Amino acid sequence: MATGTALGGHRGPTLRHGGARGPSDTLTVVNQPPINQSRRIVTDLPGPRSKELDTRRTAAVAPGVSSVFPLYIERGEGAILVDVDGNSLIDLGSGIAVASIGHAAPEVVAAVREQIGRFSHTCFMVSPYEGYVAVCEELNARTPGDHEKRSALFNSGAEAVENAVKIARLATGRQAVVVVDHAYHGRTNLTMALTAKNMPYKDRFGPFAPEVYRVATSYPFRDGLDGAEAAARTIAQIETTVGRHNVAALLIEPIQGEGGFIVPARGFLAALSAWCTDAGTLFIADEIQTGFCRTGEWFATEHEGFVPDLVTTAKGIAAGLPLAGVTGPAAIMDAVHEGGLGGTYGGNPVAAAAALAAIEVMRRDDLAGRARTIGAIARTRLDALALETPSIGEVRGRGAMIGIEFVEPGTTVPHAAAVKQVIAACAAQGVLVISCGTFGNVIRLLPPLSISEALLDDGLSVLESAIRDLQA
Ligand SMILES: Cc1ncc(COP(=O)(O)O)c(C=O)c1O
């Protein structure tokens, strides 16, 4: 694998100020030394400064917002996060599939600094600017299908999903939205309704938005169905419980993220897409977690051989700045009346500049190819480990989106305790991995696509030994 050209020894400029600041204080730009792309633990974890910050946090931050690791981050570069105690941690989660081009990529740092020095806000609905238009052009060109498209930009994934539903309802004149088991689409009121899992996302936060219907998905490890069988089951449920003429949109993640990195059986999504076309329903591909090279293609639906109607994007699009999009055929997007879509910050100029820089890095460094290489390396090791580990039920995924589902040995009973144990053991060694799954029993790997082979190997070795220790 090509090793991190995007990591190569850049200096992330940072602003530092000292003492009390008044209007005349100047901020000094200091160049920090590059962060060595290796793991290094110099204190107990969490270290004393992280502990101090955690005490302040407990007094100041609403506990409903929780964190997986109590390690407070001071800097990041490439695939390494450095905490406030000076520990260098390998990030195998990319802040949930966001830092795909690596932390503090110099191209993004430069683009953001340049843009924020010119202007940081006008509100595109008041005074437009080129960056917004250019991001829409990129989305139109890169999402599946070569038909004429339009895009609209928003702040978060949930907001993009909400807007995709608005567009689908208006364009079809129908109201029902069909979602599937294990789906995750966000935490706003409509997207809570669209999301499947109750705890922690929905519990006691209702009532939820109406006209949302949930049907079965394809989960080969648990349902044993091939794509055609699973699609027939799903379509029959829609037809009988909702009625095809009522469905505005079928909304689905091409690989389910929070729900457990569930890769549907081959043909499932294409069959649903064909049914949507026949029923006059829009197929909305939620590519928020899978998009932007993560699965080895620019978008995960490209693996499936069909073109979705609407595509929602966020996360990896802008290297950590808040940006999201909805992209669809001109005929559908043009149906919405003038002023019907928007928001104060959607497509913010600084986030747009970051996105354009990030997309250029993905293209230049062929990060989709890197994702395939990362996937091949990780799968070779994890598939071998699975053969000797009875508590691994399945290793699955595409490209650099890899899930390891844990079960009680010899059964398919979910084993969430194993996941907790492995994550804690990895964190203690300075490797950050995160979980997912309706049953909390899946470890998901989402490394920055720019990670070097050496760092990936080190991270995987720590993960392997944590999993082996389960049996010990
Ligand atoms: C598939 C999918 N859709 C929507 C969302 C919601 O995105 P956000 O957290 O930016 O609102 C997520 C976030 O994890 C996601 O994975």
Image (tube, rainbow, N blue to C red):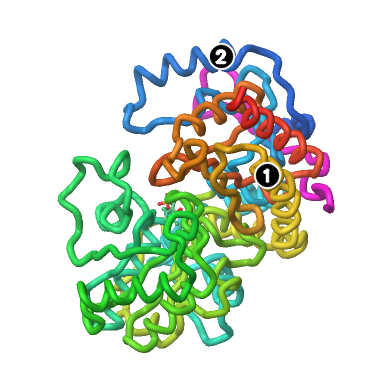
The picture places residue 52, in percent across and down from the top left corner, at: 49, 12
**Looking at the rendering, which quadrant does residue 235 occupy?**
bottom left
Circle 2 crowding by C-alpha within 10 Å: few under 14, some 14–19, many from 20: some
With respect to residue 247, does 68 lie above or below?
above
Question: Is 14 part of what is drawn in magenta?
Answer: yes
Q: Position of residue 244 (x, y in %)?
A: 26, 82
Q: Name the one closer to the observer, 76 or 70.
A: 70
| Residue that sits furthest to the left in the current view | 207
Q: Pointer 1: what residue?
A: 382
The location of residue 283, given as percent across then percent down, is 40, 76
- What's the amino acid at mark 2? Arg
Q: Earlier in the sequence, mark 1 or mark 2?
A: 2
Q: Secondary structure at mark 1?
A: helix
Between label 1 and label 2, give the one nearer the viewer. 1
| C-alpha separation, residue under disc 1 versus residue under disc 2 | 35 Å
Identify whether 303 is placed above or below 12.
below
Q: Which residues are magenta?
A: 1-28
* Residue pictured at 21% horizontal, 76% vertical: 240
What residue is drawn where x is 53% and y is 80%?
Answer: 306
